[in-house]
Amino acid sequence: MDGQLPLVLLLLLLLRASGPEGQDPGPGAPEEEPPEEEVPEEDGILVLTRRNLGLALREHRALLVQFYAPWCGHCKALAPEYSKAAALLAAESARARLAKVDGTAETELTQEFAVTAYPTLKFFRDGNRTHPEEYTGPREAEGIAEWLRRRVGPSATRLEDEEGAQALIDGREVVVIGFFQDLQDEDVATFLALAQDALDMTFGLTDQPKLFQKFGLTKDTVVLFKKFDEGRADFPVDEELGLDLGDLSHFLLTHSMHLVTEFNSQTSPKIFSARILNHLLLFVNQTLVSHQELLAGFGEAAPPFRGQVLFVVVDVGADNDHVLQYFGLKAAEAPTLRFINMETTKKYAPAPGGPVTASSVSAFCRAVLGGEVKPYLLSQEVPPDWDQRLVKTLVGKNFEQVAFDETKNVFIKFYAPWCSHCKEMAAAWEALAEKYKDQDDVVIAELDATANELEAFPVHGFPTLKFFPAGPGRRVIEYKSTRDLETFSKFLDNGGKLPAEEPAAPFPEAAANATTEPKEEL
């Protein structure tokens, strides 16, 4: 027995070595997850982290999560509306809850859910963590709440009798009712899916024969009732092809709008989302009786163009200076007409001095649609000191002369005065001009693309940076990399391209005609 441990002692040592206190997990073992914590709240909004998201998803079957950054201006603007929406839903004892994640602190979550801009909102249903729905709804309290109501409850009211149908129609300005003989038909699912997102309309549906009879219907039809214009518009369901979501959506957007819409902050989102590419604008001063009298003739011309041309009235006496600027107009030029195609952004003007009557408006519309009117381009006058600053000032009238000077390498920033990305890079652009000020063959310039249009160079986002190298051939190279002095300099020194080890990377830009909700890039 000498030199040998007793058997019992040996067993005790082995058990201790294999137990949790003496076990070495090794370098490849996963780190132990911290225990889930309670989900705290701020102003009725759940505050989520990596540690408690799973718990929140299990406890709340309908959860809208905002990923935000403390420095983000759009997030700050959304915050009070988000809190109000939470309060509205809480007062109704709704099943949906609102939550938020500080993306700057919870980088694992921003990576997991592919968050690339702030604010980003995602809707989680039934605890499904892998396929959240992207939130694309309104950014005000009632709109957020209604978007959620239509996902956790019915998106359309079931109508059983004439009294219920009439009460629904009388209670709202725009009401859409689906008349379906079989509520199990797949067309009903298409109808309800559209109703989830068309938040500015109220929806109902029915299969009751007496309601078909009351409204003069014999087959499946979607009917839009409205308290303006013709009062009603019918969309019969194709018996062979069924109900097409895109066609129905376009129909409802077109017919839910007034034949003539006044432009303001409330109507502009709908104007831009109507998917009617041609807009005819009448600029008037609503405080003048002589201008008010023109509205009747303008409206009289609208019906034949419904769905093809959107008729819009712009009051030059209201807060619409940005619209006037976009069309190169001054308030004193009202009353006047302008026509624009939203896809090409081409603008058209009638012959100056003509009257604004139903016949003249119709004739102008037909002439533009028929290709008989040439578009006009905006251009400011050339400033006397355009070349006195380090960054040269270009306008439409001196662009060609400067950009295509064969003796110069010209680097131009196309910007918008309101664009935050343009403002952020302004210092780097000035520094670039300072660095190359003694090189006679290099020109650093800028052009306000909201006030100067170039037929050969349509600008779709801000800032847009283009390099025009010296020499023949009118060559143009678009710059798409990081907006800092060092990278700009490498690009110029390398003849309009970055070294091979530094490929051009996409960079945030603001849309020239942005109609989507604002976000700030990560």
Image (tube, rainbow, N blue to C red):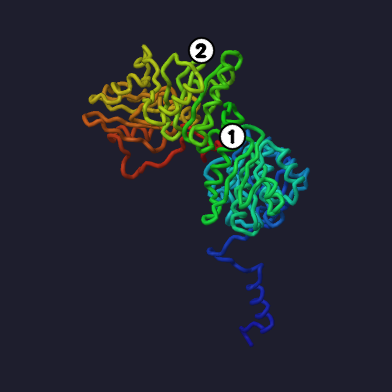
Outermost bottom residue:
1
Return the x and y of residue 91 as percentages of the image width and height.
78, 43
Return the x and y of residue 521 as percentages of the image width and height.
51, 39
Q: Is residue 101 visible?
A: no
| Residue 222 in the image: above or below residue 289 | below
Looking at the rendered image, the disc whose residue lies closer to the viewer, 2 or 1, is 1
Residue drawn at point x = 35 percent, y = 30 percent: 457
Label 2, label 1: how far apart the Cα atoms are = 29 Å
Which of the two residues, 131 or 212, is positioned nearer the viewer here?
212
> Which quadrant is home to the N terminus?
bottom right
Q: Earlier in the sequence, mark 2 or mark 1?
A: 1
Return the x and y of residue 157 as percentages of the image width and height.
71, 49
Horizontal side, residue 328 vs residue 255: left or right: left
Return the x and y of residue 179 as percentages of the image width and height.
65, 50
Which residue has dot 1 on it? 257
Q: Are dots 2 and 1 in contact, CB under 8 Å?
A: no
Residue drawn at point x = 22 percent, y = 31 percent: 473
Which of the two residues, 47 or 80, is positioned nearer the viewer here?
80
Quarter assignment of residue 298: top right
Which of the two residues, 359 or 111, is positioned nearer the viewer here?
359
Which residue has dot 2 on it? 332
| Residue 467 in the image: above or below residue 176 | above
| Residue 457 in the image: above or below residue 13 | above
**Residue type at tag 2:** Ala
Quarter assignment of residue 404: top left
Kind of element beneath mark 1: loop
Residue drawn at point x = 64 percent, y = 41 percent: 199
